[in-house]
Amino acid sequence: MYNLADRIRNTTIKSKIILIFSVITVILVGVTARVSYVFVKDIYQRQLEDQVNLLSSLLADELELKYLNFIESDENNLAYKHYKQILTDKINKMQFTNGFIFNQKLQVLVSANKDISTARLMINRKEINELARHESSVSLPFKDEDDKWRLWGFYRLNEQYYLGVQENADRLEKLDYLAWLFFAIGFGGVLITIIAGWLLARTIARPIDELVQFSAKIGDGQFNAQAPKKVHGELAILKNALIKMRYDLALKQEEKEELLAQIAHEIRNPLGGIELLAGLIKEDSDAESKNTDYIQKILDEVHGLKSQITAYLYYSRPLQAEPERVQLNNLYAEIEDIFKKRFQEKNIQFSCENLISSVWFDRRHLRQIVTNLLSNSLDAVKADGKIHIKSFSRDTKNIISVSDDGSGIKLKNPAQIFAPFYTTRTNGTGLGLSVCKKLCEENRADISAQNNKDKGCTFEILIQGRKT
């Protein structure tokens, strides 16, 4: 039957599909987000550098270099006032953050806004010293004491003096937000992919699961099982193959059952004649007061052989079920009468407990099933033993249980006792419980067995369908 191991394998298929989709998405989204961030940042930084270089050159053209040697760090100095005014006007007009003039020693002589320390300029000392006259360069973006992105621009005015500008790089902060946005988009993409992968895995695994269950039913001999409907594409080819296999197996099973039944009939007919003739001989011998032991043995062997053939017939081709409302009290009373003598011989304590009044079942089949189970219990229990029949409901099923305090089931897997030809009795056919199982299947029921905790075993008939 379709078991937990099969479900675990199907679950693994689903997990692999979801995992593969997720890993691919994480890699693609991660690489795309990183490349996009670096690409956008590089474009913005280059545009900003070109802008700073251009504005630095324009600002430098506005400065008169002939007064640079007269600048002193005194606010009353005319050269200082002159350059500060120019820097302030141009910086405001060009929308720079700050503009300043400094010398080769990196000492700031005049600044449009707040003063710039020599220590700050020392960071860019190398690139400043490498500047040729009328050449400009731009530093890497950095965060100032206000935790805002800035950019230095340097322009060499002559051999001794330099022009410096400070530009906002606020868009870099937006790029940081963009990086988080890419991350959020990637995370969302992963979630969407997981959901899509789960749906895809479910779409693939569910029809496979249904086909596996369908094939398992065919393997169990349920040739009337319905094939799954919502199966398309390549799996539909597999479904059609299973349907054909079901038809072929059902046809072969029907042929086999017909053959077995025919053979059984052909054997049973002459056996009936032998039994009749042996009976007549025995009667004649009784009348003449002769020894009839051998004739009785012949009759016993013929009777046993007929019982076996009858069991084969029931197993190979049971009567078609005709379910009806079976009153359990009446049925149990009939069966108790059948076994009354055997109960008395072994002093068996037999009891019935009916919590439901009736079940929906073929009466002939149910009578044979319960009779077989009671017969097995009688063989298993010792003298003064107990046999108990109970009828009750559990969940959506009606259950009939037959319990005894006999020797129990010696197998590790009690379900094996329902296999054809399995028996522990020397004179048993091994088909009694197999016939019970087959008759249960004919009535959409099931039968199970298990050992009791203390002693003996319990058989349960699980009846589905109509409620009582």
Image (cartoon, rainbow, N blue to C red):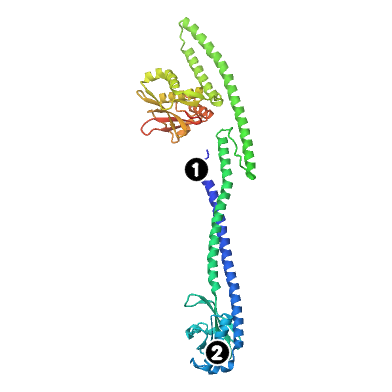
Q: Which residue is mark 1?
A: 4
Classify residue 49 by image quadrant: bottom right
Q: Is residue 187 left or right of residue 408?
A: right
Q: How far apart, in angstroms, are the residues tagged by discs 2 and 1?
A: 87 Å
Give me the residue at 62% from left, 38% from top.
Answer: 242
Using the image as rendered, state which of residue 385 and residue 382 is in the foreground: 385
Going from N to C along the chain, the mark reached first, 2 or 1, is 1
- Circles 2, 1 touching at the beta carbon (< 8 Å): no
Helix or strand or loop: what does disc 1 sit on?
Answer: helix
Question: Does residue 448 lie above or below 346 as drawn?
Answer: below
Q: Is residue 17 visible to us here?
A: no
Using the image as rendered, state which of residue 4 and residue 23 is in the foreground: 23
Q: Which residue is mark 2?
A: 83
* Residue 119 numbered mark, or none: none
- Residue 62 placement (x, y as % from top left): 60, 88
Give me the residue at 53% from left, 62% from top.
Answer: 184
Viewer-nearest of discs 2 and 1 = 2
Q: Amino acid at mark 1?
A: Leu
- Residue 285 placement (x, y as % from top left): 48, 7
Classify residue 233 by image quadrant: top right
User: In this view, which residue lies farthest toward the top?
Assistant: 288
- Residue 427 placement (x, y as % from top left): 46, 23
Question: Does residue 453 lie above or below 143 as drawn?
Answer: above
Q: Is residue 137 visible to us here?
A: yes
Helix or strand or loop: what does disc 2 sit on?
Answer: helix
